[in-house]
Image (cartoon, coloured by chain):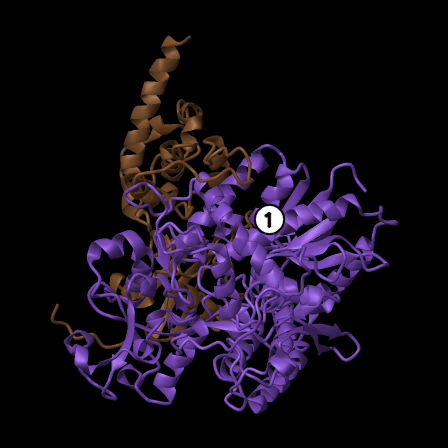
Chain colours: A purple, B brown
Amino acid sequence: MAAVPKIIVVGGGLAGLSSVIKIAEAGGKVDLFSIVPVKRSHSVCAQGGINAAKNLKGEGDDVFKHFDDTIYGGDFLANQTPVKNMTAQGPAIIDLLDRMGVPFNRTPEGLLDFRRFGGTLYHRTAFAGATTGQQLLYALDEQVRRFESEGKVQKYEGWEFLSAVLDEAGVCRGICAMDLRTMEVKTFHADAIIICTGGNGAIFGKSTNSVVCTGSAASALYQQGAYYSNGEFIQVHPTAIPGEDKLRLMSESARGEGGRVWVPRKKGDPRPAKTISEADRFYFLEEWYPKYGNLVPRDIATRAIHRIVYQEDLGIDGQPMVYLDVSHIDRETLEKKIEGILEIYEKFVGDDPHEVPMKIFPGVHYTMGGLWVDFNQMTNIPGVFAAGESDYSIHGANRLGANSLLSCIYGGFVAGPQAMLYAKNLPAQKGDGGAAKEEVRQREFNNILLQNEGTENPFKLWRELGDTMTRHATIIRYNAGLREADEKIVDLLARYRNINLSDKSAWANTSFAFARQLYNMLQLARVIVQGAEKRDESRGAHYKPDFTERNDEKFLKTTMGSYDPIADAPVITYEEVDTQWITPRPRRYDASA
Amino acid sequence: MAETKVAPKTIRVEVKRQATPETAAFVEKFEFPYRSGMNITSLLGEIAMAPVTTEGKQTTAVTYDSNCLEEICGSCAMLITGKARMACSALVDKLMAETKDGVISLAPLTKFPVVRDLAVDRSVLFENLKKVQAWVPIDGSYDLGPGPRQFPQIQEERYPLSNCISCTICMEVCPQFNEATGFVGAATIAQAKLFNMDPAGAVLKEERLRALAGDGGIQECGFAQNCVQACPKQLPLTEAISDMGRDVFVQQVKDFFAR
């Protein structure tokens, strides 16, 4: 191996930047690849906060309770050891962010302030207004910029990861990437790579995710032999603003600060919200879940809203929408704690949420599944690590609010040093380690795509994929629908071969880059629907009306999706879950226990 | 106004395009069936799905930067009906009411090199942030316990500055931001203030002030105040410039007598 390990990090959100910081600090050399300038990564969209059991509110909170809430919230599907480690490191991670200058909200005594979030009874969420992800991303971005100015980090912004370079033994020796301006395809050597490319919301068409969240990198690795685990676990966030181009998140912090979800008791009540008396309002979450109220975990709240709209027929004006109301909270509190999200609502909807209740509906939000990793964040491909939303660990069948920022930083903080350790023990590669071969493979794909004279528009294919996935693979799932979705995706893959790019130029060609991502989205979508179809139970975010109970005997197991290149299809197998610390128990938020 | 508005039948857009940095710019017109509730990014998505001009000419999807679509990532700044703003939060219904003929025009920012169509290269801002060392020089990322206590008042003053999304609109609208002055622009100055206010970040205060002294520094500001009006996140930019201007001056005087 080289005297100084060379690590490539793909993705510049919280997980990627955390890895970079650890590697640079340990004296490694890092190349950081990102589609967008890293300061514009999707972590910037996280709003509500970051969890850590600092117990600064005299409630007797501790890291074990955080551990238990996370495991219970995830319906026992997560391997427990990494969750235990993450929650134990939570308080130190918050302290570090504080030292980096994150403008966390403060108490009068000058300590960090904490608020409540879903799936816990403790004030455990540190926050910077309602733009916590933005503030955390910037803090890490600034530290990385510092390393960059010291020559310890080389950024490749505007480059897209296409695939890993694998040698004859299947060991990773670098990456193949495309410059999104020159469209040049090139390989880069590394002793280890860390994939921090986030979730795959774009597979569902409209979601709360950013444009880059296609899951393309994870899918490419899956097609190269990496396991993709728990793909069927997709979090649908209860409160998003429906929109033409995307669903804009309305943070759980709105409820953490006292926001209430309700609909008029009378079907189709035509009165303006503010004129409807308390007695005529149905605060259904508070009635159905008296202990947690509006702060039940997201899967529970989402299904409740779905039931109100589609079974009880109580959506506002008969539309698929319910009220999220903060108009009873005093202006000063709103301004200091959640102004950022209220501005988003006012800007995009035009109504002032200080005055009138917001109209919201659930939207696809978070990818619990992802690349399978061991407890050191390494995938089953030697030398390929993953961290953050792109890996499957930590959140099990449902993620608790404000745990994602923590899991990203924790994952990066494990992956960085582990990649260094791995690289130090790596035998030297033979020849070019497979680089030339991989470059040829990617160029051939590009040539076919650019020269194709078909009739299909990639953006239209994408819309069809999104419609199918949203209809069959989100809140309520039926096996017949999931099978129909899989057939549809196979059909879309066939039509993909008949694609015609309106733009065949070799400069900043966004439709070309998108068409490449689309192929990977289609492949990964099959893992999601097949995993869902085979899992005949209900657990966390995965809900089947035909199998309403959790079935630990058959399905307390990690779904392992692997790609069969001959059949060009996923193969689904299962792996035992690590439950050595907390014995699985029924998950009941409506009970008083 | 007592006028009754009839919903228009179509949305008309003119896009200033440019295939490469070297080639000449040209304008293409598009027309789409009207739908309410659209924004500029969804309109650009419509063009991508059916890239045909009003004249029926087959063309390409428009290249532009975008990511979050909720005005927090800072990607999609462009000139919309002549004004620098974010495409995601620019709503078509409002824009059509704003223009005389109802035609929405889109063009790239003018102060940055065009990459293609509406995408420009704004990396100068990130370079400027290096110059003012816009970071807290922490000892290390290992566990060193909590940071210093801070009164809420400090957080309340720092937080708005920390909301800067690096969209560069403040630089676009600034008459002083040009090649002749080499002015760093309001965003960078605001970030320098943000880190000077941090109890630990203040260790680099003098270096930041020196970086803002001299040519291209804070003295280039002409107090046009365009920045503060155009900022989509309402940063207190002029206040930051005046505070930092004072600090830079004091530092210069100190440095002069310390020679």
**Residue A157 appears anywhere in the view:** no
Image quadrant where residue B73 sits: bottom left
Quickly name the residue at label 1.
A413
Image quadrant where residue A344 sits: bottom left
Q: Which chain is mark 1 on?
A: A
Neighbor class of circle 1 (other Cα within 10 Å; few <14, some 14-19, many 20+) is many
Q: Is residue A64 above or below residue A110?
A: below
Q: Is residue A218 above or below residue A569?
A: above
* Image point (31%, 77%), residue name: A322
Whole-percent x, y for residue A505 in the image: 62, 60
SS assignment at label 1: helix
> Mark 1: which amino acid?
Phe
* Image point (27%, 39%), residue name: B225
Q: Quadrant of the C terminus of chain A?
A: bottom left
Q: Is A75 placed left or right of A248 in the picture? A: right
Whole-percent x, y for residue B254 in the image: 35, 14
Q: Is B101 placed left or right of A29 in the picture? A: left
Instruction: Find the residue positioned furthest to the left.
Output: B2
Q: Is residue B56 above or below residue B17?
A: below
**Residue A135 appears anywhere in the view:** yes
Whole-percent x, y for residue A527 in the image: 64, 76
Q: Quadrant of the N terminus of chain A?
A: top right
Q: Is A450 placed left or right of A397 in the picture? A: right
Instruction: Find the residue positioned furthest to the right.
Output: A430
Q: Is residue A5 above or below residue A278?
A: above
Whole-percent x, y for residue A508 in the image: 58, 56
Most foreground residue, A371 or A448 = A371
Q: How many marks?
A: 1
Most foreground residue, A544 or B175 = A544
